[in-house]
Amino acid sequence: MPARSSASRRTVLRGAAVAPVAGLGLAACSAPGEQAASAATSSVELGAEGEVAKGTAKLYRDHGVVVSRDAAGDLKAYSLVCTHAGCVINKLRGTTLVCPCHGSEFDAVTGKVVQAPATEPLAELPVKVSDGRIVAGPAA
Ligand code: FES
């Protein structure tokens, strides 16, 4: 029985992680359905465009988002909800995101896993610059 409930929980969390902006609501550790639903309807202004230089990344913990900028200057945004079991990632080391729960690591520029136990990349979020401000959230 424990194995079955664990498997079904993982399925639910994976479903939440691929929702468009599940991460924006920091939904994974509480009530995924409720918060993801409300967060999915609006974009979130994160900060000034200049806060994320080329080749760096920045955590926006309050919004559950990491924003990175590659060497070409393109911005990417990812949910901070770990794809392993849904903890919120709270640590950035260079451009490597570290999950506090079981030590999974992700590349903040690509969203890909660089250290197990997670196997799935982070959920990518739409991101744009509007009037010099970084805005992440669902596509208009
Ligand atoms: Fe992140 Fe397990 S929830 S490593």
Image (cartoon, rainbow, N blue to C red):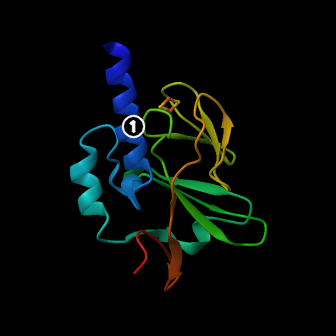
Q: Nearer the viewer, residue 81 or 7?
A: 7
Residue 97 image-quadrant placement = top right
Q: Nearer the viewer, residue 124 or 68?
A: 124
Question: Disc 1 marks which residue?
Answer: 11
Q: How many marks?
A: 1
Q: Which residue is situated farthest in the right direction here?
A: 71
Residue type pointed to by label 1:
Thr
Q: Which residue is situated farthest in the left direction here?
A: 34
Q: Is residue 127 left or right of residue 27?
A: right
Q: Residues within 10 Å of mark 1 (few under 14, many from 20)?
A: few
Q: Position of residue 93 (x, y in %)?
A: 65, 41
Q: Is residue 111 left or right of residue 13?
A: right
Q: Nearer the viewer, residue 46 or 15?
A: 15
Up/down of 135 relative to 27, above or below: below
Q: Quadrant of the N terminus?
A: top left
Which residue corresponds to the image point at 32% horizontal and 37% vertical from the top-left?
29
Up/down of 78 relative to 6, above or below: below
Q: Position of residue 120 (x, y in %)?
A: 58, 42
Q: Which residue is situated farthest in the top direction here?
A: 1
Q: From the Cβ of disc 1, is ligand 1 less than 8 Å away? A: no
Which residue corresponds to the image point at 65% horizontal and 47% vertical from the top-left?
112
Q: Nearer the viewer, residue 12 or 35?
A: 12
Q: Position of residue 56 (x, y in %)?
A: 69, 57
Q: Quadrant of the C terminus?
A: bottom left
Element class at badge 1 = helix
Which residue corresponds to the image point at 55% horizontal and 49% vertical from the top-left?
122
Q: Is residue 131 left or right of residue 120?
A: left
Q: Position of residue 75 (x, y in %)?
A: 63, 69
